[in-house]
Image (cartoon, helix red, strand yellow):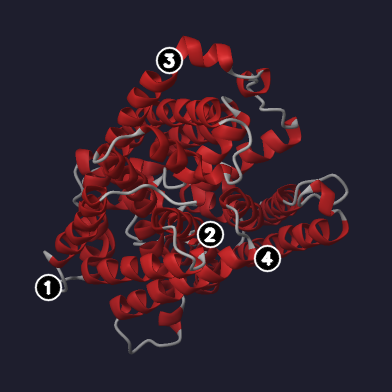
Amino acid sequence: MSAGFSFIDWMFVAGYFIFLIWLSWKKGWRGESEEEFLLSGRKVTLPAFVATLVSTWYGGILGIGEWSYQFGISQWLILGAPFYIFSALFAVFLAGKIRMNKALTIPEAIAKQYNEKAGRISALPIFVLVSPAPYILMLGLLFQFLTGGDAPFLFYASLVALFSVLYITIGGFGAVIRTDVLQIILMFGGFILLLIFAAKEFGGFGTLIGSLPSGHLDITGGNTWQYILVWFFIALWTFVDPSFHQRAAAAKTPETARKGIFISIVFWMVFDFLTCFAGLYAFAILGPELEQPVLAYPILADQILPVGIKGLFFLSLLATIMSTLDSYLFISGQTLGRDFLLNYFPGVKPNLLTRIGILVSAILGIILIILYPSVIDLWYVIGSIFIPGLLIPVLGVYLKPFRFPARFVFYSIIGCTLVSFTWLILGTVYTPGEGYMFYGIEPFYPGLFIAIILWLVGRKMES
C-alpha cells in the first residue's frame, strides 16, 4: 500500500526538510555557552514556550490515530485527561521551582539535592525514558507508506533519524525552539483541513456519530478499569519528563513557565478534538477492516484529499512527529553525554558529549522499535519500567514532603526499575495472553509499591 503522491505533494515535503536545515544552520556552532546550547539562554518567551511544549508533547500522532480508529472517544479519557491533570499540577507545584533552580538537567538537580552518585545513576533511566523510539517508528511507517517502497520501514526510519541528528547537533535547543514554532502551525492547519474534507466526503458530526458502533462512543473503549488506571499512573511521566523540565528551566520567568503550561493544556484539548474526530471519520470512511490502524490518518488523507492539500496534511503529520523526535533526541543525548559520560571523560567538552549522546540515542531508538514495533507498546513499556523508580526522587528535589535519604534514592532508581522490568518480563513469558500482566497485575504497580515503601522507610529513619 502506498500514497498517491504527486510532484507538488513531494515538493512540499522536500521544502519542509530543506527549511529545517536552514533554520538550524542559521545559528550553527557560533558562540554557544552550555546554558545557551541546552536551554537557549533561559530566555524563551511565552509564545515560543507554548509552541515548543505543545508540539513536543503531542508527537505520537500515529499512535493517537491508531487508538481513536480502534477505540473511539476513549482517547480523551485514556490519552488525554490524565495528561491534562498532571500537566496542570506540574504548572502549579513544579514549574516555578524548576525555573529558579540553577541546575540545567534533572540528573544535575538530583545530584545537588542528594549526591553525585544518585544524579549519575538517574541519567541512565532518564536516557531511555526519553528515547525517540516511538517517533522513529512512526516516521519509518509513514515514509514507507509515502514511497510504497519494498525496503523495510527500518530503512526509512534510520534515514530520518540520522537527518534529525544532523540538524539538532548543529543548532542545539535553539534549533528545536525555532522548528517547533513552524511545526505547531502545520499540526493544527493540517488536521483542520482533513476534518473539512472528511465532513464534505461523509457528512457532518451528527451523521458521523449516528454511523458509529456503540463501542466507539463508550468512554472506556471496552478497556478494563485497571488498564485505564495504569494510563493515569503512566501520565505521572509528566513529572519526570525532561522535556517539561527543560522548557520550564528555559522559560524567561517562572510566570512564563506556569502560564505557558496552562495555555498549552488548552491547545492540547483542541488538538485532541481534531485528532479524535479524524480517527472516527477514518473508521466511518475506511471501514473496520484496516490492516494497519496505525496508518489510519495517512490512509484517510490519501483517499479524500486533493493534490497539494494532501502534501500539506502529510507535512502536518511529519511536523507533529518530528517536533517530538528532535526534542527527545536532544534531551536523551544531553542526558547520556553531559550527565553520565562526562563523569568518565571530564576532559571532553560537555556539548561534544551531548552530540555523541544524540547519535547513540538514535541507534538505541532503532533497536527498541525492533523489539517493540508498536507505538502504544513502546509508550506503555518504557513508562511502566522507568517512571516508578524516578518519580519520588524527582519530586523530592522540588517538594520537601517527598525527600528522603540519599542512599534510598539510589535504591529507588535501580531497585524499582528492576522490579517493574522483571514483572514485565515474567508477564510476557508466562502469561502472554494477558499483555504484560503477571498474576493479573500491571508491571507499573509493583515498582511503584516498592518506591512508596522505600520513601516511607527513608522518611521514618530521617525523622
Q: Could you classify mark 1 by the number of other residues whose Cα lies within 10 Å: few (under 14), some (14-19), or many (20 or more)?
A: few
Which is more toward the observer, 132 or 316?
316
Residue 211 against residue 269 in the figure, above or below: above
The residue shown at (50%, 45%) is 295
Give the amino acid type for the residue marked by disc 4 in the picture: Tyr
The residue shown at (54%, 25%) is 284
Would residue 33 appear left or right of 196 to someone viewing this image?
left
Residue 203 is tagged as: 3
Give the amino acid type for the residue marked by disc 1 in the picture: Arg
State the residue position of label 4. 411
The residue shown at (64%, 66%) is 371
The residue shown at (51%, 32%) is 80
Q: Tags 4 and 1 in contact by the CB under 8 Å rule?
A: no
Res 332 → quadrant? bottom left
Image coords of residue 291 (percent x, y): 61, 45
SS at mark 3 in the image? loop
Q: Could you classify mark 3 by the number of other residues whose Cα lies within 10 Å: few (under 14), some (14-19), or many (20 or more)?
A: few
Image coords of residue 208 (percent x, y): 50, 16
State the residue position of label 2. 129
Residue 438 against residue 109 in the figure, above or below: above
State the residue position of label 1. 30
Would residue 24 appear left or right of 364 to someone viewing this image?
left
Kindly report the distance in space between the C-alpha atoms of the residues bearing marks 4 and 1. 42 Å
Would residue 108 appear left or right of 133 to someone viewing this image?
left
Would residue 287 appear left or right of 452 to someone viewing this image?
left
Res 289 → quadrant? top right
Give the amino acid type for the residue marked by disc 3 in the picture: Gly
SS at mark 4 in the image? helix
Foreground mark, 4 or 1, reads: 1
